[in-house]
Amino acid sequence: EVQLVESGGGLVKPGGSLKLSCAASGFTFNNYSMNWVRQAPGKGLEWVSSISTSGRYIHYADSVKGRFAISRDNAKNSLYLQMNSLRAEDTAIYYCATNTIQPFDYWGQGTLVTVSS
Amino acid sequence: DIVMTQTPLSLSVTPGQPASISCKSSQSLLHSDGKTYLYWYLQKPGQSPQLLIYEVSNRFSGVPDRFSGSGSGTDFTLKISRVEAEDVGLYYCMQGLHLPWITFGQGTRLDIQ
């Protein structure tokens, strides 16, 4: 069974930093690209970033480019999102999602990031 | 960016009755490989999204056959043949024409009358 467990969310001041983690199990992690998607309170879904199997290919939404950095550690079956220069509009639940059989086919339960002074 | 527009934004359905959600894309989702990259997700209350339908009309693993998808080009529909109480939540369409630059519709809230 595919399992994705996010962690690392919390309350941070504007301009601050936070690093999210996603622990994967139940599938061969290093065979699949991975994604981060966020959902602001009461809002819809927004793609944030994606990373290829080896980490060679990385993509970001314009809204986070230059501030967020996605990475992965295949030895630890883990996905990360380093978030810097955080803004109030980055407040959201952050989900990691796999691309195993289909794009964005399995999602974690999410971790809440709140950016507020 | 490809814009996805869903209608209606909310609907209330009596159990056992059908429901239908429309999704329109700002450009054709037909890829040069012949596939159309339109997906449907359901986010149940307090849960993360779950994949229901991929490539317009294919049910994902474990999805009940009361869910069906149809459409082509820029116009797509998700139908629930007989709504059950467990179907409440937010339904999103998503385009995957140029992965990973996906975009979602605004979401359609389904509740039970």
Image (cartoon, coloured by chain):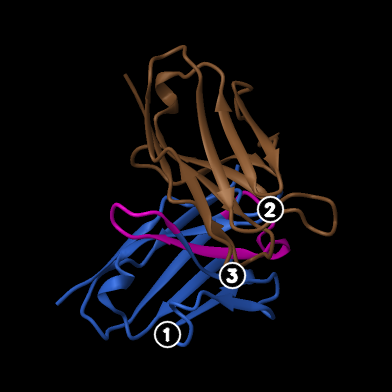
Chain colours: A blue, B brown
Residue occupying the point 47% across, 14% down: B17
Q: The numbered mark 1 sits on a residue in which chain?
A: A
- The answer for how far apart the CA atoms under marks 1 and 2 are is 27 Å
Tally of numbered tags: 3
Task: Please give left or right for residue A78 compared with residue B31 in the image.
Answer: left
Please report the bounds of the magenta region as a residue range: A25-45
Residue occupying the point 68% across, 71% down: A52
What is the residue that sits farthest to the right in this orientation?
B33
User: What kind of element bears circle 2?
Assistant: loop
Which label sits on residue A67?
1
Where residue A106 sits in the image (x, y, percent)?
57, 49
Q: What residue type is labelled 2?
A: Thr
Q: Mark 3 highlights which residue?
A: A50
Q: In this view, does A104 lie above or below B1?
A: above
Comparing labels 2 and 3, the label whose residue is closer to the camera: 3
Quick one: label 2 or label 3, which is nearer the N terminus? 3
